[in-house]
């Protein structure tokens, strides 16, 4: 794969206007596109799918048949259809995998484009399927098999829409070529055409062409399906962060695919929107991870301070009102730090920091009992019986084992690793030039975009059964 392909900048989108036929791109207002996508995301496709899909297929039963990662049909890396292993010595040592992460992120973009190209203008309804297959598995407990594609499997009512078109227009040349790509044998197609009448119903027509079951557009026996389910062997933390990406962007990607299937977006335009949103997500995630690093440092300082104050309460010798004010202020700041960390994790999907809980829950309950409002800040502003409160706190603290601030080195290292993962994912998330996705070489050796007929041939290659 050309290096320029992997590192192509989003500026390539502007360049294609000079180099290829503008008919290949649906140029509309980006603001209008984003509004259309976001509005469509509020409407759930699946509940209304059944009425648009009268063929013998039950989406609810399909949902119930979901399988977990542990039950996926896993093949060894030797069966993979893309490069998977990061190195033959992966078990012996953890190598520098930054290039592999960037390549993994780049594939996410490329594969989505070809999904969009396959469904473009097919007028069908598409929704997320279950990840049942996995090409590749890791033999090292420090590594996982990470799916590069944000969507490994899709369900649709493509056959229903194709049957509807045939009943309206007959067996056109394009319809016949699509049927052959879906695996309909020539003799079966000839037999059906011989007895075909426009008055026949969709069910009968579909079952006569597909007696073994109604397929989806990208079925399990296509090469492209196996590419969608190919994996890259990467550190476990990368695969965990992929889960975060998928939780935020799978439904969004399905919405873009449906907009493309209805002809409202061209594949490359939809891809540009996806890349733009994903890069914005990576930037926000990086900012949140950096902020969390700062919060960790501050939390450690506050926990150390609270530990010293607790020791002072146990030993005595300090003026009680002064001690109480300092203790409550430290607890308040610690609570705020935890709240800010929780907020950033909700917004960006960062994994929680395990093992850190706000200390002195019993002490806080004493404060709430005395103040009746649970606000530490209000305690500092109101007149209270500090002697009585300190006495109750001392009783509660003496019941507790001696508490000390937990070292933060492991948490800091994990966050720094996550920051590197986010940065490499962002670096690999680039919009390639259109010609590298749907292009051809001229006699002069230049790469130019495909025309409409060539794009149809590319679509057939993606959906053809093997």
Image (tube, rainbow, N blue to C red):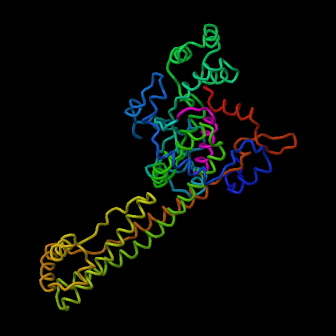
Residue 386: % across, % down: 16, 85
Relative to 193, say whether 66 is above or below.
below
Residue 246: percent from the left, percent from the top? 48, 48
Image side of residue 462 versus residue 232, left or right: right
Task: Based on the picture, tell me whether residue 115 belongs to the magenta stretch.
Answer: yes
Residue 34 in the image: above or below residue 443: below
Which residues, given as a range, are shown in magenta?
105-125
> Which residue lies at the image location 71% right of the left edge and 49% below the top edge?
433
| Closer to us: 253 or 428 | 253
Quarter assignment of residue 183: top right
Query: Is 234 situated left or right of 187 in this image?
Result: left
Nearer to us in this view, 208 or 91? 208
Instruction: Identify the residue at image location x=13%, y=86%.
Output: 387
Residue 333 place in picture, x, y as percent: 33, 77
> Dominant secondary structure of the magenta stretch?
helix
Where 390 falls versus 76 (above or below)? below
Does the stretch in magenta take in 53? Answer: no
Of 109 and 24, which appears nearest the observer? 24
**In front: 66, or 409?**
66
Q: Quadrant of the C terminus?
A: top right
- Residue 412: x percent and y percent? 43, 68
Q: How many labels does the image show?
A: 0
Asked if residue 135 lies left or right of residue 411, the reply is right
- Which residue is rendered at x = 44% and y = 63% of the image? 414
């Amino acid at each position: 794969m050309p290096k320029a392909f992997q590192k192509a900048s989003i500026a390539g989108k502007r360049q294609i206007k000079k180099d290829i036929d503008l008919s290949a791109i649906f140029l509309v207002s980006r603001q209008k596109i984003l509004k259309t996508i976001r509005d469509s995301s509020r409407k759930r496709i699946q509940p209304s799918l059944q009425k648009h899909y009268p063929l013998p297929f039950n989406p609810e039963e399909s949902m119930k048949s979901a399988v977990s990662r542990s039950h996926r049909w896993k093949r060894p890396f030797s069966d993979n259809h893309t490069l998977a292993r990061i190195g033959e010595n992966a078990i012996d040592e953890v190598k520098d995998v930054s290039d592999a992460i960037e390549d993994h992120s780049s594939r996410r973009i490329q594969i989505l484009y070809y999904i969009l190209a396959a469904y473009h203008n097919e007028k069908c309804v598409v929704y997320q399927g279950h990840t049942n297959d996995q090409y590749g598995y890791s033999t090292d407990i420090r590594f996982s098999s990470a799916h590069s594609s944000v969507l490994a499997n899709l369900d649709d009512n493509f056959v229903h829409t194709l049957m509807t078109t045939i009943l309206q227009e007959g067996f056109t040349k394009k319809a016949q070529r699509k049927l052959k790509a879906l695996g309909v044998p020539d003799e079966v197609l000839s037999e059906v055409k011989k007895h075909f009448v426009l008055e026949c119903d969709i069910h009968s027509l579909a079952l006569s062409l597909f007696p073994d079951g109604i397929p989806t557009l990208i079925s399990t026996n296509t090469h492209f399906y196996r590419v969608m389910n190919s994996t890259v062997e990467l550190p476990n933390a990368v695969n965990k962060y992929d889960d975060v990406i998928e939780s935020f962007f799978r439904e969004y990607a399905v919405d873009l695919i449906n907009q493309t299937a209805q002809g409202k977006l061209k594949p490359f335009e939809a891809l540009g929107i996806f890349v733009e949103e994903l890069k914005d997500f990576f930037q926000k995630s990086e900012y949140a991870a950096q902020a969390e690093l700062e919060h960790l440092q501050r939390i450690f300082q506050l926990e150390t301070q609270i530990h010293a104050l607790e020791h002072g309460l146990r030993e005595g010798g300090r003026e009680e009102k002064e001690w109480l004010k300092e203790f409550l202020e430290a607890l308040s700041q610690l609570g705020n730090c935890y709240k800010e960390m929780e907020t950033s994790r909700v917004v960006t999907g960062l994994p929680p920091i395990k093992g850190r809980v706000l200390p002195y829950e019993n002490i806080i309950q004493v404060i709430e009992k005395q103040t009746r409002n649970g606000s530490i800040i209000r305690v500092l502003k109101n007149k209270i019986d500090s002697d009585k409160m300190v006495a109750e706190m001392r009783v509660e603290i003496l019941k507790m084992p001696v508490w000390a601030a937990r070292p933060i080195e492991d948490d800091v290292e994990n966050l720094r690793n996550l920051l590197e993962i986010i940065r490499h994912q962002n670096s690999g998330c680039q919009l390639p030039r259109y010609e590298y996705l749907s292009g051809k070489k001229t006699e002069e050796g230049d790469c130019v975009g495909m025309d409409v007929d060539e794009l149809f041939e590319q679509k057939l290659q993606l959906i053809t059964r093997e």
